[in-house]
Structure formats: C-alpha cells, structure tokens
Amino acid sequence: MIAILALSLVQDARALALADPEGGMMEVVNDAGDVSTLPLLRSEVNARIDGDLASVTLTQTFANPGDVPLDARYLFPLPEDAAVHAMTMTAGDLVVRAEIREKEQARKEYETAKAEGKQAALLTQHRPNVFTQEVANLPPGEQVVVELSYAWAVPREDGAYAFMFPMTVGPRFIPGGGSQVEGAAAELNAWAPGMPVGETTPPKTVGADRIRLNVTLNGGVRVGLLESPTHPVTMRADGPRVRHVSLDTSADVPNDDFILRYRLGHDDVGVGVMTEGEGGEGTVSLLIEPPQAIERSAQVPREMVFLLDTSCSMKGKPMDASKRFMLRALDTLGEQDSFRIIRFSDDASALSDEPLPATGGNIVRGKEYVRELSGNGGTQMTRGITAALSTPPRAGVMRTVVFLTDGYIGNEGDIIALVEKLDSDARLFALGIGGSVNRYLLTELARVGRGTARVVTEMDKAEAEADRLAERLAAPVMADLVIDWGDAPVRLATPERLPDLFLGDSLRVLARYDGVGTFPITLRGRNGSAPVEIPVTLELPQRGEGGEALRLVWARYQIEDLMQQYTSPANADRREQLQSEVTAMGLEHGLVTQWTAFVAVADEKAVASNDGPKRQVELPSRSGNPVRTNYGGGSFSGSASPEPAGWAAILLLLGLGRRALRGSGEED
C-alpha cells in the first residue's frame, strides 16, 4: 500500500528527518534547521457487490498535526475500468460536493482557490488506473476527508468472480528519447507532473492502522466459494446469499493488490440479461458465460509466440513463474502447431527467426532456451513487440502472442499504438506476474488483440497457477464473436470489438435501448473450425431493475472504446474529435476521464467551528520492485493507501511558498 504523497511546504528544503515512523509522522528540515510536520493519511474502502456489479467508496483522510496550512498531493491506483462518478470533501463542519469539469477548468478553479486560501480538492486521472488527489490549505490541527465513489463490473476469471482493489502503483520504466512509435498518443506516454524519479524499494507490508477494507457481497443466489488469496480476512454470513468480508488488521497488511474470489450458486451455461432504466429506455447488459467443459472441434493450427520480459524487475519469482508457464505451455502444442520464443529487456532476441514446428526435438530445444533465461536491464517493450508482430502469420494459422511481464513501464501509449500498427490478426494473451502489476497495460493489450489477461499474484503458488493457465490457453471456447441484434432497438453496444472467450471466463456486452418488447438475438462465433450459434431471448422492460451502476459501467466502457480509437495511429487525424467525444461523455455522466476531473472548493477561507451544525455546500451544477533509471529513461511508483514514513520521505516533492517555513501564512 505505497503512496506517492507530495507535500507543498517549503521552497528550499534540503534534508528530511523522520519522527515516529511507525505512526507515520514525518518532518521536513531545511538548511536553517527549521522543521515542519507532514500530514498523516488513512484510507478506508467500503464495497457493496450485487452479483457482479460493485459500488465502491474510497475515503482518504488527510490530517495536519502541524501549526501551518499544508497542500498535499497523493498518487494512487484504482481498477483500470472503474467508473469514478462522485467526490465529496469534508473539512471540519464544511461538506463540499465536487463537480465534474473539463480538466483544464478544474485545475484553474483549484489553483485559484488555493491562492485565495480556500480549502479545495482536485481529482485527476493520469491513466485509467492511476489518479492524483490534491488537497489545498489543509488547516493546522484539523482533517480533510475526501470520499470517492466508483462503479465497477467484477470480472469472471477461471470460473470465479474476482473483486480487486489495487493497493500499489508499481514502479515504471520510461524509455528515454520521447515517443518511439510514430502516431502514438503523447498523453499516454507522459506521466504525473512532478512525480519523482529515483531508485526505490516499496515495503512488503503497511501498518494496519492505515487501511480499512470492508466488502458486502449480495450474490442474489447462494454464495459458494469465497476466499482472498492475497490477504488475511474475516468473514461473516448473513443467510445463504450475503457475506460480509473485512481485511484482517490484527497485524500489518500485505502490500499487494487485494483480491476477493467468489462463486455464485448458478453455474448455468448461456447468456444472462440485466437492464436498468425508466420509461422503456435505459441500459441492457449481456453476460456471456461459456460451459465448464466443452467438446473441442477440430482445432486451427496455432503459432504460439512467447514474448518474455527479462528486465531486472522480473528477477526471482516473477521470472520463475513465467518460465514455468512457458515450459508447461510448450507441452500443450500439437503436431500441427509451431512456436517462437522472444525475450526483451534493453534489446530483443529470439530462439529462432522463424516459427519452429512443434516436434519433440524442437520442444526440447525450446525448453533448454527457456531455462537459461534470466532478468536484467530495462524494459524496452517496443523491441519485443516488433519482433513478435512485424511479420504476418502463415495462411490458415492462428497466431497467439503471450506477453509475460509485470508491465512496469510508463510509455503505454507507445506500446498500445505499436500493437495497433502491427495488427496481424494475432490473438494477444497478457500474463502479469506480481502483486502490483500494471493491469491497465495488460488489459489493453488483451483488448486490442481480442485475447484475455491474467495476473498471477500468489508467488508461492505461481507454478500451479502457470500450469492451469497454460491449459486454459490451449484454445478459446469461442472465437470471432459477433452479436446479431436482429430488430432489437439497441444502440451504442460496447465493447465495439469482442474478444475471444476462454474456458472459465465471461464476457459482458452493454448497450443502450429505447424500446419495450421481446426480441430474438444471436451470438455467433466458432469453436475451432466449427461455427457456433447461441440464440438468446432479449427482454427489454418498461422499467429495469439493474441500478445506476449498470449505466455508469456502460458509459465507462464507451469511453474505453473511444480511448482505444484515440491511441491507434490510424486515427491520429481524428484525435481532437475523439477527445471531444470522451470529454462530452465524462461531463454527461459525471465521470473522471483523461480530460475531465472533479474539483471541490469551499466558499470561504476559514473552516466553520466544530461547535456548529454541519453545513452542506452545493456548488452550481455545470455541463518490492526497484525502479531503474539508468537506461536512458526514468521511473516512478505510488499507492492506494498510505505509506510508512520511511518510504514516503524518499518520494516527497517540496516547493511551494515559504509560508510553512515562516509560519506566517504569507508569501514573499
């Protein structure tokens, strides 16, 4: 649970001293020996899951134990497709509900309020899974509480749903020299302004007093499996359908992404339909789930390309798990299949220039090559991708590219653009290794390549996980999926490009509807070389019962489709239009995006007395892996919850006015 906490305190600070590291109190010491105390921070997560739709509230408490006002900036992660739709700031008796704005306007309002001595908060997005919370004029001796709300569709992986709350922004390697791909979106290569560059090692745990996490699961049907493979938890049943889960804080908490896996009582095969709305219009959701077992049709010959990250961050267990996966996956290849093995770090090299037939001798040769691989160097992923995708596959062969990486890079724009540019109709399967991998990158690679993404978080069980994933990757249950909506009055279906469906997975498709009735629709695809059709009866009611989360998730999916178009070099001349569409979608549905942000500003300089009643201010509504830096680039890391003082001290950014140094509240 590592955070980058940037405090604007003194202009010429040179040294840092720590006081009471266990309690998290930090101090800044300048050349003259003047000391200022830094704020404390706590995080609390409360989630309610209805079936597979989660409504989550993240509460961040900033406390200032010093005697001068402070400004704080805090980098933290959320799920990559979370629909962040509300923010509230509470300062003393004052409650301010944030408003959604275009990002530039939000920044302007925040900076104006900060300069005027008003309390304010600003929430911005740097990546779909990385955000910055800024708080201005945190009063001495008081707290400011910022509450964020988001909706999220819980994915189904390997037969179970996996609720995830990310604790850490893992370190990132950023290659030097600017964009490496012509036509790449510059916004997705730039990182959070002012974030530090240096070599840091996150701690393995965080103090139990700094994080609370509670989940209420309402399955709607009997809840089966319920476990957290990543953290100790306490559980309480409330009948067969409801479970209450809390993070066990009797000891320090593991500094890894929190995962809660669960199964629901129905294991029926087919397509589930859910709707929300009023007056015969709203949002419809199709949840497509494959059977637990399926008879395989004749399989299309495969070219399996293993693309392994051998940078220094993959040393140890991540590398061991990746190698185990490749060794196991090689055993699944048939006589008609072929394979390549490519490694990349500072450069890229391969076992062979051409795909090797999956003969017994070549499999042995491939395994010997894999066993000799080791981790070292930077993460020049573009070189590996170019080697994997620059030549088209042979006719009649399905190419599957398996990325094995922790995703610790900061130039996602280059990577996604390059995959789009080299599109060879390959299926991309992204396997992330580690407790705080870059899930946004992995998900986007799979999304662009119509594949799927997996994350191995339990290093102690990585070998067994690798075996299981290799078996599931042998072939998709259904490929080349399309939905024939027939005469159903639906529009704006998302995702625009459907991925292949693998055993144990599910696929959610959302759309808007504006008519009532019963309509036959058809899901089409193929299993191996055999065509498959699944008929579905679509009921579109006058009033849907799905709740607002469904609409918010649909809007977020729409934004993801637009952003995928935005990142494609083929759409470089349409980026201004696509940016306008994303911005309009964010403003209409009240969502944080690349170009919209939440801002909350108090209407007065001083916080009201605690003796008075609480007032609601309504604003006017308006439409351990080290970071390496010696490869010509830079890097960073950060987290969803507060960090131990020793870690945060390394990551401080110092440098606003001298008011904190003098305690006068005035600028020079």
Image (cartoon, rainbow, N blue to C red):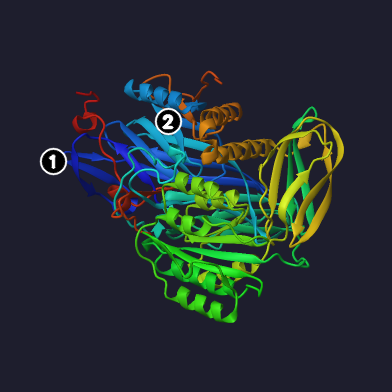
Relative placement, left or right, of 617 versus 55 is: left
Label 2: element kind: strand
Name the residue that disc number 1 marks.
Answer: 31
- Which quadrant holds residue 74? top left
Expressed as whole percent of the image width and height from the top left, the position of residue 631 reads 31, 54
Residue occupying the point 48% across, 56% down: 385
Q: Position of residue 296 (x, y in %)?
A: 76, 67
Query: Viewed as shown, does residue 535 lie left or right of 253?
Result: right
Report which residue position mark 2 lands on.
121
Place of residue 402 in the rendered image (x, y in percent of width and height, measured from the top left): 55, 61
Disc 1 marks a residue whose amino acid type is Asp
The residue nearer to you, when weighing 214 against 550, is 550
User: Height in image: 328 above or below 651?
Assistant: below
Vertical placement of residue 108 versus 572, above or below: above
Position of residue 404 in the picture relative to residue 561 (left or right): left
Label 1 crowd (10 A; few <14 / some 14-19 / many >=20): few
Q: In the rendering, at what x and y percent does residue 363 appear?
A: 55, 77
Give the vertical position of 63 relative to 338 (above or below). above
Residue positioned 76% across, 59% down in the render: 267
